[in-house]
Image (cartoon, grey):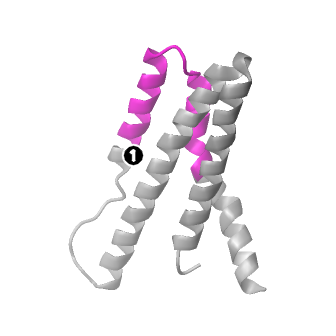
Amino acid sequence: MDNMTPMINAVTRVTFVLMAGLLMGYALHHETRAVTLGMTLGLVAGIVNFRYLAVKVRRVAESVANNEGKAFSLGFVTRISFAILVTMFSVKIEHFSLEATIAGIFIPQLLSIPVGIYLSVKNKL
């Protein structure tokens, strides 16, 4: 897959649909409010990390393609710091489920696998 933009946009759309469903679950099902809020918070952090990683990968690819000799990184420290910040926010405020928040951080990255497979099969047909 040469162009990552369709995959990034598709993962973003799927994540927003998940967040909309979770917020509807928050409004309609009072017993699971902590879980739905925690998962929504985790999804927000996960999609921010996912899109930030996509920007960094694009910059690294441009740097390599242009034979620029400057050093580059994928922003691991920034992404892990943001994940820790969201996790600490979830711990500090008792209305969020910590387990759901941590799970939500990883979901957009995991969604990129089936979305990438789907888009590559769709483009080959």
Would you say 59 lies left or right of 5 here? left
* Residue 86 horizontal/vertical position (percent): 43, 31
Q: Is residue 36 above or below residue 113?
A: above
- In this rendering, is residue 90 above or below 86? above
Question: Which stretch is magenta?
Answer: 79-108
Which quadrant would residue 38 be assigned to in this image?
top right
Residue 72 x/y as whole percent? 28, 64
The residue identified by callout 1 is 79
Tally of numbered discs: 1
- Image location of residue 66, percent across then percent down: 29, 85
Which residue is pictured at 61% across the width and 50% down the height? 15
Q: Is residue 107 shown in magenta?
A: yes
Given the current orientation, which residue lies at the most extreme top position? Answer: 94
Which quadrant holds the C terminus?
A: bottom right
Q: Which amino acid type is shown beneath numbered disc 1?
A: Arg
Residue nearer the viewer, 10 or 57: 10
Name the spot of residue 124 as percent of width and height, x first.
74, 85
Residue located at (59% from left, 78% from top):
1
Residue name at image x 41 percent, y 32 percent: 84
